[in-house]
Image: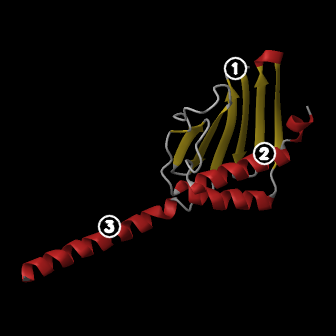
């Protein structure tokens, strides 16, 4: 009986030690001093590519290529501090999840001509990316869905040239 109790206490202390080590190792997850977020939408049907890059300084760079019309453009904008604070806060949540490589590609009811969305982030020591086509309801993790929505909103509000065409 004493051996079982001792074994149980040993396992329990080992478990707490591992959790504490993981907590101290997660300090990198909260480190968003330097980061880059890349959001892109591509369509092979019309050979269209739209890429928005936001860095930790608030610089939003847009590169858009439409081969069908032989047009392209590059633009730069400064994102507001409140938008950057929101992106940084949500990025901390996204870093805590293990994103799948792809979402929505196994949906049999999906149309076949939608653009593909790609999201990548780079931080001091952590990076991850995913490709999204036509996800089912609740297929995306909540943190990723919220982050993607905010990034799309920030791009839409700042890239005024795209929406004037």
Q: CB atoms at circles 2 and 3 under 8 Å apart?
A: no
- Which quadrant of the structure image shows residue 13? bottom left
Q: Going by the image, does 16 lie left or right of 29?
A: left
Residue tagged by mark 1? 45
Does any portion of residue 11 appear in the rendered image?
A: yes
Render colour scheme: secondary structure
Q: Position of residue 160 (x, y in %)?
A: 89, 41
Q: Is residue 122 left or right of residue 52?
A: left
Distance from the alpha carbon under mark 1 to that under mark 2: 23 Å
Please name whichever residue, 54 or 67, is drawn nearer the observer in this view of the structure: 67
**N-term-proximal mark, 2 vs 3:** 3
Q: Nearer the viewer, residue 107 or 37?
A: 107
* Visible residue check, residue 70: no
Q: Depth check: give the residue in front, 144 or 161.
A: 144
Dot 3 corresponds to which residue? 18
Q: CA distance from mark 2 to mark 3?
A: 40 Å
- Camera-side mark, 1 or 2: 1
Name the outermost residue toward the bottom. 2
Q: Is residue 58 left or right of residue 145?
A: right
Residue 104 position, x and y percent, is 56, 38
Q: Which one is earlier in the sequence, the residue at label 1 or at label 3?
A: 3
- Residue 64: where, in percent of width, then height? 78, 29
Q: For mark 2, does the 10 Å Cα neighbourhood hold few (<14), some (14 to 19), or many (20 or more) residues?
A: many
In the rendered image, residue 18, in percent from the top left (x then y), is placed at 32, 67
Callout 2: helix, strand or loop? helix
- Whichever of labels 1 and 2 marks the residue nearer the N terminus, that label is 1
* Mark 3 residue crowding within 10 angstroms, few (<14) / some (14–19) / many (20+): few
Residue drawn where x is 39% and y is 64% of the image: 22
In the picture, which quadrant includes the C terminus?
top right
Determine whether 142 is above or below 102 in the image.
below
Q: Is residue 112 above or below residue 61?
A: above
The residue to which callout 2 is attached is: 155
């Amino acid at each position: 009986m004493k051996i079982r109790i001792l074994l149980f206490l040993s396992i329990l202390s080992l478990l707490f030690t591992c959790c504490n080590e993981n907590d101290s190792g997660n300090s990198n997850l909260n480190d968003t001093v330097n980061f880059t977020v890349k959001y892109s939408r591509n369509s092979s049907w019309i050979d269209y590519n739209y890429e928005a890059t936001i860095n930790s300084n608030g610089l939003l760079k847009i590169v858009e290529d439409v081969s069908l019309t032989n047009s392209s453009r590059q633009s730069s904008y400064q994102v507001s501090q409140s938008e950057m604070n929101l992106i940084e806060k949500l990025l901390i949540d996204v870093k805590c999840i293990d994103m799948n490589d792809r979402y929505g590609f196994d949906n049999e009811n999906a149309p076949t001509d939608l653009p593909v969305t790609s999201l990548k982030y780079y931080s001091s020591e952590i990076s991850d990316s995913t490709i999204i086509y036509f996800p089912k309801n609740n297929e995306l993790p909540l943190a990723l869905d919220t982050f993607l929505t905010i990034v799309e909103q920030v791009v839409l509000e700042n890239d005024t040239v795209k929406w004037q065409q």
